[in-house]
Image (cartoon, grey):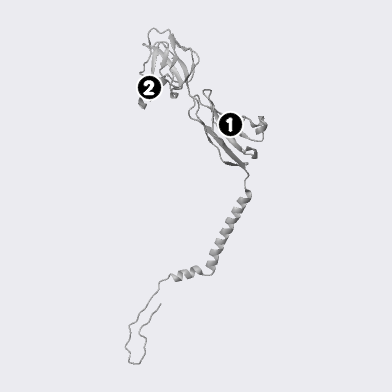
Amino acid sequence: MGTKAQAERKLLHLFVLEILLCSLALGSGTVHTSEPEVRIPENNAVKLSCTYSGFSSPRTPSYENRVTFSSSGITFKSVTREDTGTYTCMVSEDGGNSYGEVKVKLIVLVPPSKPTVSIPSSATIGNRAVLTCSEPDGSPPSKYTWYRDGIEMPDNPKTSRAFSNSSYNLNPTTGELVFDPVSASDTGEYSCQAENGYGTAVKSNAVRMEAVELNVGAIVAAVLVTLILLGILIFGIWFAYSRGYFDRAKKGTSSKKVIYSQPSARSEGEFKQTSSFLV
């Protein structure tokens, strides 16, 4: 089912390029549209206007189930967000002596969903921090507005007293908010709002970001502790070598030899060594 729908959509987009807001005449025939851009909510029927003149015997393609063709255009029974695009109406005579086309942009309207945000819980003052906001459903694509502590952030922070100490770039199209660098005044609760001119604007959850100082003292202390531990380790290895502990360990692991001798004959009352050991 999905494959068939994709094939039909591909055929319709033989009908597809960028927008052209005028009628076009190639040869003696002309093709015209009364609505070069059409906006319609999802799941509704819509007609894309396409009329022609100057063709003695025009030919038009036909598609099953997806659309209905007529001499004045094509009609979708029910559009989905995937149908958004620019459609080209092409008309030509059987002999190919005359040809004309016109383009119509179709925008299927879908309200935005609740946006999701990526906001660091802390950002180091003087460093760069990137906050992102996005939502996948809106058609046309949503524009994004950022808020700090409930106050809308302007595109240029220097235009507002509330944000004059901040240094950031805000992209309403991508939803990206970049602090470069982060300042102490950037601490706060951030949220973003998505809207596309259709339906109700939707705001994300608020997430707090703390602007923190770089702890130079802790870094220096950590480096010093690491150096001290490394020095102790090196001294311990040197001391063991100087005391010969490593040489003794090597001697202790050398193989031992044991020699046994047979007991010799002895007379009564006479003591003699009966065996000997060599270690």
**Neighbour tally class for label 1: few under 14, some 14-19, many 20 plus, Cα within 10 Å:** many
Label 1 – label 2 distance at C-alpha: 40 Å
**Neighbour tally class for label 2: few under 14, some 14-19, many 20 plus, Cα within 10 Å:** some
Residue 42, quarter of picture: top left
Residue 234 appears in view: yes
Q: Secondary structure at mark 1?
A: strand
At horizontal 66% and vertical 30% (from top left) the residue drawn is 160
Residue 270 as seen in the image, left or right of residue 161: left
Residue 207, relative to residue 82: is it above or below? Answer: below
Question: Image quadrant for the N terminus?
Answer: top left
Q: Position of residue 238 (x, y in %)?
A: 55, 65
Choose mark 1 or mark 2, whichever is in front. 1
Residue 227 disc label: none
At horizontal 58% and vertical 42% (from top left) the residue drawn is 122
Q: Position of residue 54 (x, y in %)?
A: 42, 7
Residue 102 as seen in the image, left or right of residue 260: right
Residue 4 as seen in the image, left or right of residue 157: left
Callout 2 amino acid: Glu
Q: From the image, tell me which residue sits under label 1.
A: 146
In the orientation shown, which residue stands out farthest toward the left?
Answer: 265
Quick one: 208 or 176, which is closer to the camera? 208
Callout 1 amino acid: Trp
Residue 127 appears in view: no
Residue 8 disc label: 2
Question: Image quadrant for the C terminus?
Answer: bottom left
